[in-house]
Image (cartoon, helix red, strand yellow):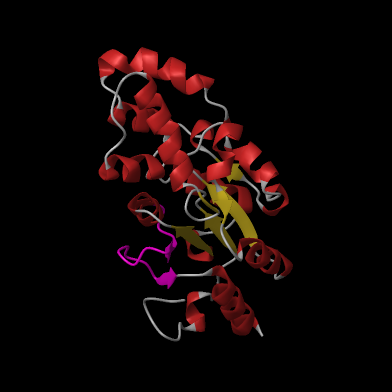
Amino acid sequence: MFVSRDNPSPELLKGIHGFIFDCDGVLVESKDANRMYYNTVRETIGMLPMTPEEEDYVHAHAVIPSMQRIIPPEKMAEAEAVRRRIKFTDMLPYTTLQPGLVELLTTLRELGFKLSVNTNRTDSMEMLLETFELTEFFDPVITAAKVKHPKPNPEGVHAIMRHWGVTRQQVAYIGDTGVDEQTARAAGVAFWAFRNEGLAAALHVEDYEPLRRWVVACLA
């Protein structure tokens, strides 16, 4: 479960009032969907599929910088026209819910924790939450479309903290990429890494069920 230590200290949970979750790679496994989405755009306009480095980039960043990264300027108008024809539902077969997530969210909510999402998705987030029946768990849900500066800028985290009326010492941010790590650091909140040992984090989480049991044990 925890890469950083065999027996995480309950002190890591002390004072935490709320959890902010990234979406892709954390709530859902969607790298295949992202790969299919952007490669469809590229291949339609006559480009080769993305490189592994480009796949990692679009997994973590908002759609506009992602398109700017993988599409040449002279092809951008054509690529945007293709992208806008792709439906979110076309990508659903390539998106799966992370195991143990619903049970974790249910327990956290029952224990009184606030839950939110801070994602670089834009217009697909609400539909994703509805599709996987997660809408009831999160308030607020911050997307790249709701801020002037998406992650790794801390604007979204700051908006969540204001909405909750909490301080940075009362928040833990759960993410799986360097962008999430940078976001948490910029906001001054604790960062918990999900399935990425290469990130600098207070806590490394491999699976949600052990995390759920640990939280319950800490508060028993």
Position of the C terminus, as image quadrant, is bottom right
* Vertical position of residue 60 compared to residue 174: above or below: above
Quadrant of the rendered image containing residue 149: top left
* Residue toward you, 124 or 148: 124
Q: Is residue 64 magenta?
A: no
Q: Residue at x 53, y 64 (%)?
A: 170
Q: Position of residue 171 (x, y in %)?
A: 52, 62
Q: Residue at x 57, y 35 (%)?
A: 124
Q: Which residues are magenta?
A: 187-205
Q: Position of residue 84 (x, y in %)?
A: 50, 20
The answer to whether residue 41 shows anywhere in this view is: yes
Q: Residue at x 50, y 44 (%)?
A: 119
* Residue toward you, 137 or 197: 197
Q: Residue at x 65, y 51 (%)?
A: 138
Quadrant of the rendered image containing residue 146: top right
Instruction: Give the side of residue 176 with respect to residue 164, left or right.
Output: left
Q: Position of residue 101 (x, y in %)?
A: 61, 62
Q: Is residue 203 magenta?
A: yes
The answer to whether residue 150 shows anywhere in this view is: no
* Residue toward you, 182 or 122: 122
* Residue toward you, 199 or 45: 45
Q: Position of residue 107 (x, y in %)?
A: 69, 69
Instruction: Give the side of residue 120 with respect to residue 106, left or right.
Output: left
* Vertical position of residue 165 compared to residue 64: above or below: below
